[in-house]
């Protein structure tokens, strides 16, 4: 897994209830928009040298996290052109090990 995906996973599990939202244009199957959201639905903001910006999740990072089974789809929220993903137990464990210096 690439560092980018690891960073996304760390930010996801940092706050209980955060999730990744993915939606796309169902007519063209393009215009993917992937963002991390707070439990209440607001998009996650991150601080940087220029101030604050919303956290966009690269589609490739989402695919890697799914493939590694570190996040899974919330099937109760499934809709056409829309998916939600939440951290799995394995994802939370991996971040726990990483926070203790055990992450590879």
Image (cartoon, rainbow, N blue to C red):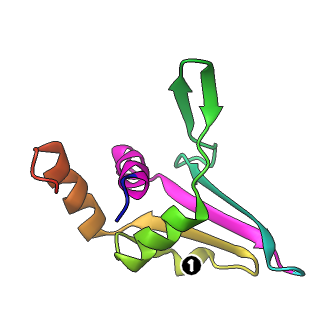
Q: Is residue 53 left or right of residue 5?
A: right
Q: Is residue 49 left or right of residue 93?
A: right
Mark 1 Cα shell of 10 Å, populated few (<14), some (14-19), many (≥20): few
Give percent across and percent down for residue 36: 56, 51
Q: Residue at x 21, y 60 (%)?
A: 94
Q: Quadrant of residue 65?
A: bottom left
Q: Is residue 51 above or below residue 86?
A: above
Q: Quadrant of residue 42?
A: top right
Residue under numbered circle 1: 76
Q: Residue at x 20, y 61 (%)?
A: 93
Q: Which residues are magenta?
A: 4-26
Q: Is residue 86 above or below residue 6?
A: below
Count of numbered labels shown in the rendering: 1
Q: Residue at x 44, y 71 (%)?
A: 64
Q: Nearer the viewer, residue 79 or 90?
A: 90
Give percent across and percent down for residue 54: 63, 38
Q: Secondary structure at mark 1?
A: helix
Q: Is residue 75 above or below residue 11?
A: below
Give percent across and percent down for residue 45: 57, 34
Q: Is residue 15 magenta?
A: yes
Q: Is residue 81 left or right of residue 85?
A: right
Is the N terminus in the top left, top right, bottom left or bottom right quadrant? bottom left
């Amino acid at each position: 897994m690439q560092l980018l995906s690891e960073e996304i996973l760390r930010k996801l599990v940092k706050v209980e209830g955060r999730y990744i939202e993915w939606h796309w244009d169902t007519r063209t199957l393009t215009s993917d928009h992937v963002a991390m959201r707070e439990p209440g639905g607001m998009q996650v903001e991150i601080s940087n040298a220029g101030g604050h910006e919303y956290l966009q999740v690269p589609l490739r990072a989402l695919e890697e996290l799914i493939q590694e089974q570190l996040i899974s789809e919330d099937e109760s929220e499934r809709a056409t052109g829309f998916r939600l993903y939440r951290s799995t137990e394995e994802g939370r464990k991996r971040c726990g090990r990483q926070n203790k210096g055990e992450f590879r």
